[in-house]
Image: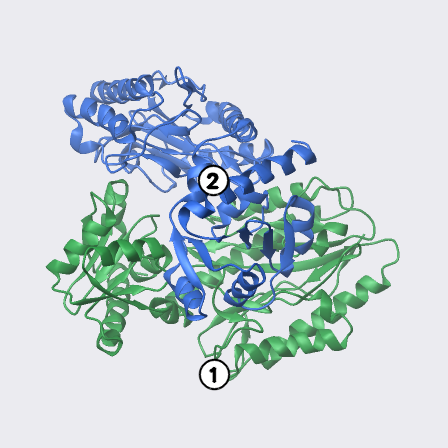
Chain colours: A blue, B green
Amino acid sequence: MTGSSLISRHLSLITKIRDVLANKGIDGFLVTDITNVRYMTGFTGSSGFLMINEKRNIFFTDFRYKEQAEKEIAGWEISIEKGERQKTVINTARTFNINRLGVEASITYEFYKKLTRKGIRLKPVKSLVEEMRKIKDEHEMTLIKKAITRAESAFRDIKPYIKAGIKEKEIALRLEEALKKRGCKTIPFDIIVAAGRNSSMPHAKVTERKLKAGDLVVIDWGGEAGGYFSDITRTFLIKGGNIDRKCEIYSTVLKANMKAIASIRDGIKSKRLDSIVRDFIKKAGYGEYFGHGTGHGIGLSVHEAPHISWTGSEVIRSGMVFTIEPGIYITGLGGVRIEDIVMVKPDCPIILTSLPKELEIIN
Amino acid sequence: MTGSSLISRHLSLITKIRDVLANKGIDGFLVTDITNVRYMTGFTGSSGFLMINEKRNIFFTDFRYKEQAEKEIAGWEISIEKGERQKTVINTARTFNINRLGVEASITYEFYKKLTRKGIRLKPVKSLVEEMRKIKDEHEMTLIKKAITRAESAFRDIKPYIKAGIKEKEIALRLEEALKKRGCKTIPFDIIVAAGRNSSMPHAKVTERKLKAGDLVVIDWGGEAGGYFSDITRTFLIKGGNIDRKCEIYSTVLKANMKAIASIRDGIKSKRLDSIVRDFIKKAGYGEYFGHGTGHGIGLSVHEAPHISWTGSEVIRSGMVFTIEPGIYITGLGGVRIEDIVMVKPDCPIILTSLPKELEIIN
């Protein structure tokens, strides 16, 4: 993105916040969640916050990020905070003539109390920026697609190493290296390579275990581009042993994955999407072995709204990007998970991940 | 650590919590901070919480971590949360006959409100577990030392690559790989390799810039062992150009580092320690170029209490482990930071980091 189109993107985000101030009964808004700060400003550092009112919008960070902020941020006043954060917030709210300051409901209870003790009137507002983040714009889509391309291309590179005799850890190390070489500045989460018995733990840690005949191998990894993440899972089977039941589980998970994707449309409830997957797996006789959610939004956070689960009450809308990742995990036998990333369009979903997902039995 | 000594460690931590319940006016305590959960139980997953009263102590996680929790956790009842977290908390508080539940002040405002809306009496308690975490026991010291050894040995491996012509990014990649090969399961933070102009940004991102003659090169990295972290910075100078001022800055930072370490003793205030460094750098004429804190505690978090800065009001005690990391950063010229990890002992501090810190001018 060029400098000027970045500025206009940021200004339009600021306008969105300004547009809802009055509705929320506030005349200023404080953004403390660092990922929301990045979303609003493009700032990539680890410390900073924002204050916005009708007329002014200011970005605060500390000394360590002074130069970086000046390089990265456009469309915002920049200021360096020197003392305790609550004092900076209070002083700025006074300068801005803010009567009632909206704060993010994700603020810690402790910081909320510190601010109220200073006599400022606060109103917690839930998910204001998070709601904006749910719908991805073109700039964001480009980066998410890039994060997927990097993840998939890195995976193709290391794919030949997935075979009997190699350690889980070795695969994970090679994959991480390949991701970094493709330009991923960070790795969104610890790569999962879980083989055999380990594969029945949906969030297994990588171990020294060697892949062996009959193993189900779950690999869950992600890439990054410009701060945006991808998150993909594929499961393989190492040839050998009695594999009938493993193939049946795989086929059930794959069907659940495809059924869910086929059901995605603008207007469907996240809970409904989850129940399509859950009911299908239950009918196949594996209900008790699928205990996690069906998927999650992805963007600047690996897990963000919408949450596709039985507790979710969100409506799926065009422009959302999320994972679909059913799984079946049987202690002692192993697990299968197949995770894709989809984007909702008015007519039909677009599957952004392109790696094959038919069962591959590795020789 | 053997299984039984781990159990006895966990039981003694639980007892510490129980011992203060009455003082705080609560008859139960909820631990939601995931690092505190790890500290109390040894659980390495990303989702879980704890509830403790006089008689019972229970660990909750979700389906994804069922098997892992059963393997990792000893001394706790284990339960799997199925619905919304606030419901699980409320139901457990009722089962436990808790009248007033202590919650961590780091809880989000949103979750606090959700709990109060359900009619439960809450009392936020500040830093209960964090205070315990400040003083490291033998088990923790072993892991921190291991995290340092891994970081230093990985660094020695890649040290020959630090020379003119190599890219910042290449050094960072090699260092990360070396850390992983030594057994670090995670990397505590994005490695900083900042050369030349980039080195004046204390938290610079790695770039494609090649090291060249006259560059100051700041390298800030850390290792991991059993969930505990290390955090070290060394600065080098690439031979060439006019280096007098750079050498002077280096020498100032080194003296500040050594002065601070020499001043550490049980009973000194963190603010005092910071001012020793700050005043020294100021007198040398570089006051405005040192804007960050002098150091921070390290353990299961890279940055934890005590915070050695001008806003800190903590008293340094025997058993604490923290960094000392003065720096000088001059836009256009470059920066220097020298960061060690020290442990406070009753008589004198022990410097745990052992890499040389005299200025090395690389040919």
Q: Is residue A39 above or below residue A164?
A: below
Q: Residue at the spot x=58%, y=78% of the render? A: B273
Where residue A127 appears, as percent x and y from the top left, is 40, 44
Quarter of the image holding residue A330?
top left
Where residue B211 appears, as percent x and y from the top left, is 76, 46
* Dot 2: chain letter: A
Residue A91 vs residue A225, the one in the foreground:
A91
Q: Which residue is mark 2?
A: A188
Quarter of the image holding residue A298?
top left
Q: Is residue B146 above or below residue A219?
A: below
Q: Which quadrant: the C terminus of chain A?
A: top left
Residue B338 vs residue B330, the one in the foreground:
B330
**Could you tell whether A201 is left or right of A24 in the image?**
left
**Three-letter residue code for mark 1:** Pro
- Disc 2, SS: loop
**Three-letter residue code for mark 2:** Pro
Q: Residue at the spot x=77%, y=66% of the render? A: B249
Q: Which quadrant: the N terminus of chain A?
A: top right
Residue A208 vs residue A290, the one in the foreground:
A290
Q: Which residue is mark 1?
A: B346
Where residue B150 appears, as percent x and y from the top left, is 52, 55
Where residue A50 appears, as percent x and y from the top left, is 54, 52
**Could you tell whether B36 is left or right of A33 in the image?**
left
Q: Is residue A52 above or below residue A311?
A: below
* Dot 1: chain letter: B
Specify whether residue B177 is in view: no
Residue B121 vs residue B302, the one in the foreground:
B121
- Disc 1, SS: loop
